[in-house]
Structures are given as structure tokens and as C-alpha cells.
């Protein structure tokens, strides 16, 4: 398993009970972890269309906090 596949697998394990799915890693971007900047990949996630923005924000924060290596979560509109 490549490092990218491993990251997607970790994100999808977290998302499984939430009816969401990570589809792809995107370009590296700057995120903040603690007091330091962090440079790592974005992850694209398919969220259900009926999910409200507050829930999306909560899930996105969990992903960044619980999956080391992910700097940002993007909503996949495709």
C-alpha cells in the first residue's frame, strides 16, 4: 500500500459510520497543527447533499485532528 492509499484508508475508516467517503488526495497545502504550520495533502470527501455545513465542518475538523498527514478537507462537488 502506498502512503497515499494508506492516508485515504485512514480517512475512510473514520468516515465509514458517517456515510461519507474520501475519494482522492489533492495538492499539498498549509494547515496549522498546534502552534506550527504543517504542509501536507488535502483530502477530497463526498458528503451527502442533505448534510448541513455545521456537520461538514465538524467532520472536517475531526479528519484533520485525527488523521496525521492531512492538512485540509475539501468537499468533492463532482
Image: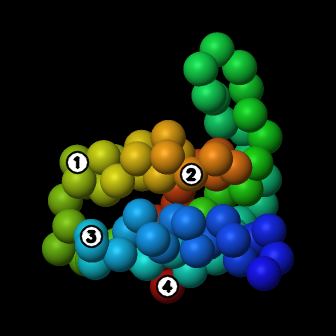
Number of numbered callouts drawn = 4
Quadrant (top left, top right, bottom left, bottom right) of the N terminus? bottom right
x and y, in percent, of residue 17 in the image: 27, 72
User: Dot 2 corresponds to which residue?
Assistant: 67
User: Dot 3 corresponds to which residue?
Assistant: 18
Mark positioned earlier in the residue sequence (4 or 2): 2
- CA gap, disc 1 and disc 2: 20 Å
Mark positioned earlier in the residue sequence (2 or 3): 3
Residue at image x 50%, y 40%? 65
- CA gap, disc 4 and disc 3: 19 Å
Residue at image x 33%, y 48%? 57
Picture disc at residue 78: 4
- State the residue lying farthest toward the right: 2
User: Dot 1 corresponds to which residue?
Assistant: 54
- CA gap, disc 1 and disc 3: 14 Å
Tell me: residue 27, above or below residue 47.
Answer: above
Closer-to-camera residue (60/76): 60
Q: Can residue 30 be seen by looking at this rendering?
A: yes
Mark positioned earlier in the residue sequence (4 or 1): 1
Disc 1 secondary structure class = helix
Residues at circles 1 and 3 in contact by the CB criterion of under 8 Å: no
Tell me: residue 68, above or below residue 17.
Answer: above
Kindly indicate the quadrant of the structure image that contains residue 25: bottom right
Q: Can residue 76 be seen by looking at this rendering?
A: no
Residue at image x 42%, y 43%? 61
Tell me: residue 17, above or below residue 1.
Answer: above
Residues at circles 4 and 1 in contact by the CB criterion of under 8 Å: no
Mark positioned earlier in the residue sequence (1 or 2): 1
Amino acid at each position: 500500500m502506498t502512503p497515499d492509499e494508506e492516508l485515504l484508508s485512514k480517512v475512510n475508516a473514520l468516515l465509514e459510520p458517517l456515510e461519507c467517503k474520501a475519494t482522492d488526495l489533492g495538492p499539498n497545502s498549509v494547515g496549522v497543527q498546534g502552534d506550527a504550520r504543517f504542509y501536507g495533502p488535502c483530502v477530497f470527501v463526498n458528503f451527502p447533499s442533505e448534510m448541513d455545513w455545521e456537520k461538514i465542518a465538524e467532520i472536517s475538523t475531526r479528519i484533520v485532528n485525527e488523521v496525521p498527514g492531512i492538512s485540509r478537507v475539501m468537499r468533492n462537488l463532482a
